[in-house]
Amino acid sequence: MPAYKRVLLKLSGEALMGDDSYGINPTTIDAMVTDIAEVVANGVQLAIVIGGGNIFRGVAGGAAGMDRATADYMGMLATMMNALALQDALRQKHVEARVQSALRMDQVVEPYIRPRAIRHMEEGKVVIFAAGTGNPFFTTDTAAALRGAEMGVEVVLKATKVDGIYTSDPKKDPSATRYDTITFDEAIIKNLQVMDATAFALCRDRKLPIKVFSILKQGALKRVIMGEGEGTLVHV
């Protein structure tokens, strides 16, 4: 029996790269959608917010001298490419998916309309939210927190390349240990940087827990959904 009925999954663009340095790795995205399909088959209502860092990173563009707002809009377009690729991969697994964009692209995808997104989820379709919040200067982490609150999800699942939150960087510190659970206040005091500050504050204020886990571990998404000991839970 799933521990959660409705969840939002935050996928970074970088997670789609696999071992590549750019773009979308077919083997990696196939493994992801296999896990997603299994979760949906268990009756879980799923929304996804996807990043675009595998194609274009707005902050990096801004740092290189490009106008930050322009760079962020380019990043939003990159999320659209990832969302369409994910939708197509899900359909190949016989999972119905709808992409909704915070930027108007009516010839390609639906605009973001909250009641329609909720209805899609209630009908068992996966809803993929693209283009972040539709505004520059906000990350896709913030979009995940915002859409999660709007959709009334029970938890935001932050999928990363690391299997949870550690006391320090496990790549640099072999003695680092993983937290099973941690409070929002503890994460702030220890400066663990679970999400960017805006997203984190929104989740904390809405009492919306965050689960951090590795999307690269086969079956990890299902174990999180089933309430098994996978990843780190951040709670009030």
Image (tube, grey):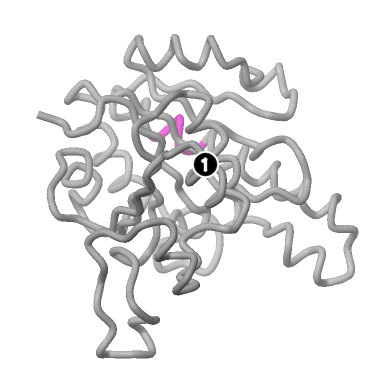
For the magenta stretch, what is the residue range?
85-89
Residue 214 against residue 69 in the figure, above or below: below
Q: Secondary structure at mark 1?
A: helix
Q: Nearer the viewer, residue 112 or 228?
A: 228
The quarter of the rendered structure image containing the N terminus is top left
Seen from this angle, which residue lies furthest left?
1
Residue 177 image position (x, y, % from top left): 24, 78
Residue 136 shown left or right of residue 97 in the figure: right
Q: Main secondary structure of the magenta part?
A: helix
Residue at 78% in and 46% down: 136
Local crowd size for mark 1, using a 10 Å CA cut-off: few (<14), some (14–19), many (≥20): few
Residue at 18% in and 49% down: 219
Based on the picture, tell me whether residue 107 belongs to the magenta stretch: no
Residue 122 image position (x, y, % from top left): 36, 12
Residue 128 shown left or right of residue 166 in the figure: right
**Tally of numbered tags:** 1
Residue 179 against residue 181 in the figure, above or below: below
Residue at 34% in and 67% down: 165
Residue at 12% in and 48% down: 228
Give amino acid for label 1.
Asp
Residue 127 shown left or right of residue 180 in the figure: right
Residue 220 image position (x, y, % from top left): 21, 51
Q: Nearer the viewer, residue 136 or 108?
A: 136
Residue at label 1? 205
Q: Nearer the viewer, residue 105 or 150?
A: 150
Residue 41 image position (x, y, % from top left): 19, 24
